[in-house]
């Protein structure tokens, strides 16, 4: 089985169903920066718990210190992607700061849609850019080596499981399980009469929803979207085997309403004790360990991403704050980005909201905070190691033509992945066969490949 490279090897290679609008109003007493001159910035964010925490504490902290008013728009992931792409790509200029990820940053940098942030970070003596984790920096850098988005939190993927349910069934989770073992556990623990699913997995269409976990399954089963010469392999035996495994597992032992379940829905399902296992983002752990929002706090075990033919298979993702070129408030936007992604912000979250809620996975110093290490003892080390093991250059068993673990780092993938995910989601719903879904996907992939050969 191929070994995963360390991040240093590839560094140079490179919520909810409603829109929530929050306004952080200026408070008395301004610190350094805008000094209460009426400056306001608009910020578009994904509706994940960490971002909602950011919106919650901005007024009493950032605005109070700087006098800068922050107007937030918070959207579910799929809606966020549509909105931010439309605004930035068309130079709409509606937002001063926008949430993007490891997929968008290098592509949008090449399109000259974003301000580079290296010069801001280097000039900001309190920012400490060198403290940022290498995988986060590499994921958000352009071909020129400059940073084009500042990491808010980083993540890989791992398997979360309910220790009480496992103990009651006399089952032991390996540190590095295989997908076959996971399927066996799901069959043993599935209890439809008690309303407990064997496993929760994303089935909601979207290249960043359903295909985030599914592509990692494809990778470890030996499949790939494209071979190095751009030959499409969407309906190849390995891709098909992985997809059928995923679909069959969900249909047999997954949560109710799986075709409509994304990250948020599975977070709620598992967090309420209604699933025995959940394979998803490492960033979910902070919410699961918060007793105020989770009934399974203290009862969750964490294992590395399940594998089949590879040694590891966790994804690599960074949610980050970027500054579109169209902003007219660049200095104020950087002040906000610097505050929200800086070292002191994590301490603020820990002391005011709880240490398990810290948006980790982006700074080495986070893992040196005693309070955080104590609170996150169950998942901090495995999260950091999963991020370090993820290899966007070589995530499977064959060479790839573009960077990415759970995505293909080309502009066309957002549309391709979303369209194929709609077909696979329909297969989860029992409306089409996996073979038909992937045959249609192969034709779409052929069109994409023809542009790159």
Image (cartoon, rainbow, N blue to C red):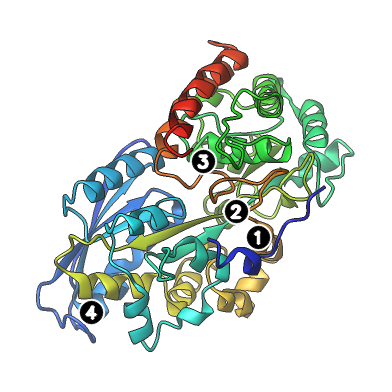
> Is residue 222 found left or right of 73 in the rendered image?
right
Marks 4 and 1, how far apart at CA = 34 Å
Q: Which mark is residue 392?
A: 2
Residue placed farthest to the front in the image?
453
Q: Earlier in the sequence, mark 1 or mark 2?
A: 1
Residue placed farthest to the bottom in the image?
125
Determine crowd level at label 1: few under 14, some 14-19, many 20+ residues with C-alpha closer than 10 A. many
Q: Earlier in the sequence, mark 3 or mark 1?
A: 3
Secondary structure beneath label 2: loop
| Numbered disc in front, either 2 or 3 | 2
Q: Earlier in the sequence, mark 4 or mark 1?
A: 4
Q: Is residue 44 above or below residue 162?
A: below
Location of mark 3 (residue): 263
Residue sitting nearer the eye, 331 or 41: 331
| Numbered disc in front, either 1 or 2 | 2
Cβ atoms at labels 4 and 1 below 8 Å apart: no
Quarter of the image where one finds residue 364 = bottom right
| Numbered disc in front, either 4 or 1 | 1
Marks 1 and 2, how far apart at CA = 17 Å
Location of mark 1 (residue): 383
Marks 4 and 2, how far apart at CA = 39 Å
Q: Can I make out residue 195 in this image? A: no
């Amino acid at each position: 089985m191929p070994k995963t490279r360390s991040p240093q090897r590839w560094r140079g290679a490179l919520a909810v169903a409603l829109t929530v609008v929050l306004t952080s109003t200026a408070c008395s007493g301004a610190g350094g920066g805008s000094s209460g001159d009426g400056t306001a910035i608009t910020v578009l964010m994904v509706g994940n718990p960490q971002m909602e925490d950011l919106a919650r504490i901005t007024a009493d902290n950032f605005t109070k210190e700087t006098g800068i008013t922050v107007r937030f728009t918070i959207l579910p992931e799929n809606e966020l992607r549509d909105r931010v792409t439309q605004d930035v790509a068309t130079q709409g200029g509606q937002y001063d700061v926008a949430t993007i990820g490891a997929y968008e940053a290098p592509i949008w940098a090449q399109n000259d849609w974003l301000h580079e942030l290296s010069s801001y970070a280097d000039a900001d003596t309190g920012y400490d850019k060198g403290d940022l984790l290498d995988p986060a920096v590499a994921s958000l850098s352009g071909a020129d080596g400059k940073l084009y988005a500042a990491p808010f939190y980083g993540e890989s993927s791992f398997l979360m499981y309910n220790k009480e349910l496992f103990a009651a069934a006399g089952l032991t989770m390996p540190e590095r399980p295989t997908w076959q073992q996971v399927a066996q556990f799901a069959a043993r623990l599935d209890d439809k009469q008690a309303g407990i699913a064997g496993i929760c997995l994303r089935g909601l269409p979207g290249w960043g929803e359903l295909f985030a976990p599914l592509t990692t399954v494809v990778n470890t089963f030996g499949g790939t979207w494209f071979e190095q010469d751009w030959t499409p392999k969407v309906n190849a035996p390995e891709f098909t085997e992985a997809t059928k495994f995923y679909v069959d597992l969900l249909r047999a032992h997954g949560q109710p309403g799986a075709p409509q379940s994304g990250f948020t829905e599975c977070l709620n399902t598992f967090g309420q004790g209604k699933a025995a296992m959940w394979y998803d983002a490492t960033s979910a752990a902070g919410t699961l360990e918060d007793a105020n929002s989770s009934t399974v706090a203290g009862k969750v075990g964490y294992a590395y991403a399940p594998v089949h033919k590879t040694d590891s298979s966790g994804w690599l993702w960074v949610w980050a704050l970027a500054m579109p070129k169209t902003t007219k408030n660049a200095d104020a936007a950087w002040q906000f980005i610097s505050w929200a992604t800086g070292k002191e912000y994590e301490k603020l979250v820990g002391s005011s909201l709880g240490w398990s809620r810290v948006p980790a996975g982006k700074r080495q110093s986070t893992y040196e905070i005693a309070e955080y290490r104590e609170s996150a003892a169950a998942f901090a080390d495995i999260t950091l190691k999963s991020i370090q093991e993820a290899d966007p250059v070589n995530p499977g068993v064959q060479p790839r033509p573009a960077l990415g673990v759970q995505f293909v780092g080309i502009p066309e993938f957002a549309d391709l992945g979303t369209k194929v995910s709609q077909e696979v989601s329909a297969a989860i719903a029992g409306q089409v066969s996996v073979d038909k879904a992937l045959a249609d996907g192969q034709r779409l992939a052929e069109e994409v490949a023809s542009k790159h050969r």
